[in-house]
Amino acid sequence: MGFLHRGRQQHRPRREVTRGRVAKENFRVRDVWVAVLIVLACLLGSPAVFAQDQSNPPSAPELAKKTAIPAPPKTHRFWDKENDWLFAGVGASRTLDYFSTLNFRRRGDHEVLLSNDLVDNHAAFAAVEAGATGLSIGVSYLFHRYGHHKLERWVSIIHIGAATGGAINNYCLKTVHMATPAP
């Protein structure tokens, strides 16, 4: 009888059989479970859900109980004595790195981190070393500005250690002997 109604077929949603159960193609149970899991993860992961606990309502306003305002923690000035010594140490270690790099360049070795042309241009290389010192002081200031005072000090300490270690390594490198042509 299907051949009689070829032109006028009724639109029925397609169905598929999966493991003995019939599910509409437009409505998938798996999609619903994914949506439920996402909503649960958002609710359980959000601290705002647990922000207001009504199990013990406050008896009196909290502002009336606290009369004394605690003093803010004492912070140090950026240009204090310790930072002055640390920044002087950064400058000294960068100066040591400058001279050790020039020394091993004179002995015939090649710079790995910078181009040899930059190192051989003494004014440009001195500007790079001064810029690195200024960058270290700037990063320390950013940490100071946002209240990370231990990190403020550690930036200079690590910079001193890295630059001094690099300078020691430069002085420990063996001299490169160029082969001389036989007469």
Image: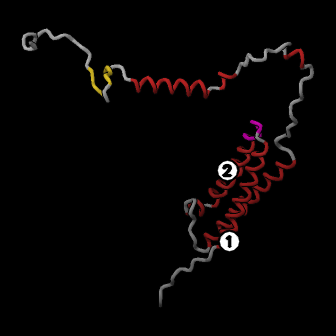
The residue carrying mark 2 is 131
Secondary structure at numbered mark 2: helix
Please give the range of residues in magenta.
Answer: 142-147
Q: Main secondary structure of the magenta part?
A: helix
Q: Which mark is residue 171?
A: 1
Q: Residue 24: x and y, percent?
A: 31, 20
Q: In the displayed structure, would residue 15 be above or below residue 10?
A: below
> Is 9 left, or right, of 92 in this rendering?
left
Which amino acid lies under the numbered mark 2 shown in the image of this protein? Gly
Q: Which quarter shows the N terminus? A: top left
Of residues 25 and 87, the one nearer the viewer is 25
Local crowd size for mark 1, using a 10 Å CA cut-off: few (<14), some (14–19), many (≥20): some
Which sits in the foreground, 40 or 17?
17
Residue drawn at (68%, 67%) of the image:
100
Q: How is the image coloured?
A: secondary structure
- Quarter location, residue 18: top left
